[in-house]
Image: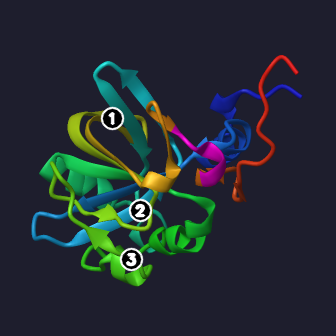
Amino acid sequence: MEINPSELGEKEVYKLLSGSVVPRPIAWVSTISESGILNLAPYSFFTVASRNPPMLCISVGPGVGEREGTEKDTLANIRSQKEFVINVVKAELGNGMQKSAENVQPEINEFEAAGLTPVDSIAVKPKRVKEAPIQMECKLDQIIPLGTDHLIIGQMIHYHIQDEYYLGNYKVNLEKLNPLGRLAGTYSEMKGLFTLPR
């Protein structure tokens, strides 16, 4: 089967992309509004953008459902405050992460709604998710409009890892971390690690 994406609607192209670029890591992004309201939301269009300086990027799409046609709180807050935290989602936190993904009004604190604990960051104003094994504090570098979405690039300026997930020599215990991965409408856990060649 051959497909020309220019002949498809946005929804059909998204289905192909989200079912092919898998599994995707999830950036659980915490931000704070100008008036001090905490915000938390997951994004699976997420990766490392640069190693030196260390930079991470997430792609944020437009609002959906009841908030269709609006700008997501994450994007608005990062644009305004120029700071954010990327929390890593272990599989056991999946239900809380899913709760924080719901479309709610900007005045709703997703930390409270999802039953999660906000803790102070070291170098930025947005709070970290205490329950997340790894948290990366970021300062905004740039926001690049790309079609319907916005690519947010931030420099990681502080890194937190819970002791039980740290192997030493700057290595993460991935088996213990068991990060949640995003597929097309479903999720995956990290199982059966191996090296190549077998």
Q: Does 82 sit left or right of 147 as displayed?
A: left
The secondary structure that most of the magenta stretch takes on is helix
Q: Is residue 69 magenta?
A: no
Q: What residue did someone put label 2 on?
A: 41
Which residue lies most toward the front here?
A: 168
- Where does residue 191 sit, x and y in percent of width and height? 77, 48
Q: What residue did someone put label 1 on?
A: 145
The one nearer the camera, 65 or 108, is: 108
- Say which amino acid is labelled 3: Val
Helix, strand or loop under label 1: strand
- Distance between mark 1 and mark 2 Cα atoms: 20 Å
Judged by depth in the image, the label closer to the viewer, 3 or 1, is 3
Helix, strand or loop under label 3: loop
Label disc, if present, on residue 84 of the rendered structure: none
Against 111, residue 152 (above or below) is above
Q: Residues within 10 Å of mark 2 (few under 14, many from 20)?
A: many
- Say which amino acid is labelled 2: Ala
Bounds of the magenta segment: 172-176
Q: Residues within 10 Å of mark 3 (few under 14, many from 20)?
A: some
Q: Residue at x 63, y 30 (%)?
A: 6
Q: Is residue 173 magenta?
A: yes
Q: What residue did someone put label 3 on?
A: 104
- Where does residue 195 sit, x and y in percent of width and height? 77, 26
Mark closest to the chain's N terminus, 1 or 2: 2
- Where does residue 98 sit, x and y in percent of width and height? 55, 70
